[in-house]
Image (cartoon, rainbow, N blue to C red):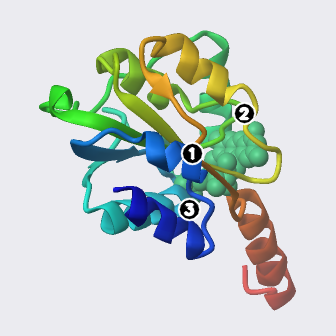
């Protein structure tokens, strides 16, 4: 376990400090993640492959809109009123895992509402909880506090953080190009 984690670090991805790696317990590993535009999915998939972990995609029962701006609006409203959207599925046997890697993007300077749903729906007491966070350049916000608050009995370790491409910028660049094409 430790050597696998260290080899990930050596591979250029600062997944966890060696101190954190040494702390990971024996036992089954789950990588649970939520991703809209794919950045966090790539991180989660890599961790899953490297550690031969089980993978679980966190999905809301009612999918978010395809439209980015509608999603931003909906997420903001949900976050403001502390809404936890129902999950499409829960992890069948969460008790079997000693370590849970939890992957998510930063939404509105915090963890997405569906991540709060996931934490509320699963008992992570005494498990090692390793955040895998991607953001668009504004950092972790209060996401770590959210994890600590909703899963207070989990052993929250440092985890991995990375800036990823922002869907907003991609949309803007594509729209600029389309405007220049004058094809619409
Ligand atoms: C609804 C929404 C809100 C976002 N809010 C933030 C934010 O507050 N700070 C930030 O740095 N990035 C923000 N982003 C950008 C994402 O965190 C970033 O692009 C992330 O890597 C996307 O991960 P994904 O591809 O796994 O969905 C937001 C993206 C979306 C869709």
Q: Is residue 76 visible?
A: yes
Residue beneath disc 1: 19
SS for callout 3: helix
Q: Quadrant of residue 96?
A: top left
Dots 1, 2 in contact, CB < 8 A = no
Which residue is found at the position 40% from the left and 31% from the top?
Answer: 128
Spatial CA distance of label 1 from label 3 is 26 Å
Nearer-N-terminus badge (1/3): 1
How far from the left and from the top, in percent, is residue 159?
57, 44
Queried on whether the Cβ of the residue with tag 3 lies below 8 angstroms from ligand 1, the answer reads yes
Residue 104 appears in the figure: no
Instruction: Tell me if label 3 and label 2 are in contact, CB under 8 Å.
Output: no
> Residue drawn 78% across and 43% down?
139
Residue under numbered circle 3: 39
Residue at 49% across, 13% down: 150
N-terminal label among 1 and 2 = 1
Q: Mark 3 vs mark 2: give the one in front.
A: 3
| Crowding near the residue tagged with mark 2, few <14, some 14–19, many ≥20 C-alpha atoms within 10 Å | some
Indicate left or right for 171 with 126 as reference. Answer: right
Q: Which residue is mark 2?
A: 108
Q: Secondary structure at mark 1?
A: helix
Q: Is residue 172 above or below residue 119?
A: below
> x and y percent of residue 142 in the render?
72, 25
Residue 18 pos. (x, y %): 56, 53
Mark 2 vs ligand 1: CB below 8 Å: yes
């Amino acid at each position: 376990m430790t050597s696998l984690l260290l080899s990930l670090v050596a591979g250029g991805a600062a997944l966890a400090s060696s101190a954190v790696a040494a702390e990971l317990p024996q036992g089954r590993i789950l990588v649970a993640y939520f991703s809209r535009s794919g950045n966090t999915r790539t991180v989660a998939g890599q961790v899953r492959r490297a550690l031969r972990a089980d993978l679980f995609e966190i999905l809301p029962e009612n999918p978010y809109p395809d439209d980015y701006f509608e999603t931003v609006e909906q997420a903001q409203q949900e976050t403001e009123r502390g809404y936890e959207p129902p999950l499409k599925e829960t992890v069948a046997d969460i008790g079997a895992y000693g370590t849970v890697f939890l992957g998510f993007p930063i939404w509105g300077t915090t963890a997405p509402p569906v991540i709060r749903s996931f934490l509320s729906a699963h008992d992570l007491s005494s498990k090692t909880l390793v955040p895998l966070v991607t953001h668009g350049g504004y950092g972790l916000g209060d996401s770590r506090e959210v994890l600590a608050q909703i899963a207070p009995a989990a052993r929250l370790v440092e985890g991995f953080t990375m800036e990823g491409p922002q869907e907003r910028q991609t949309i803007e660049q594509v729209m600029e190009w389309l405007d220049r094409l004058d094809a619409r």
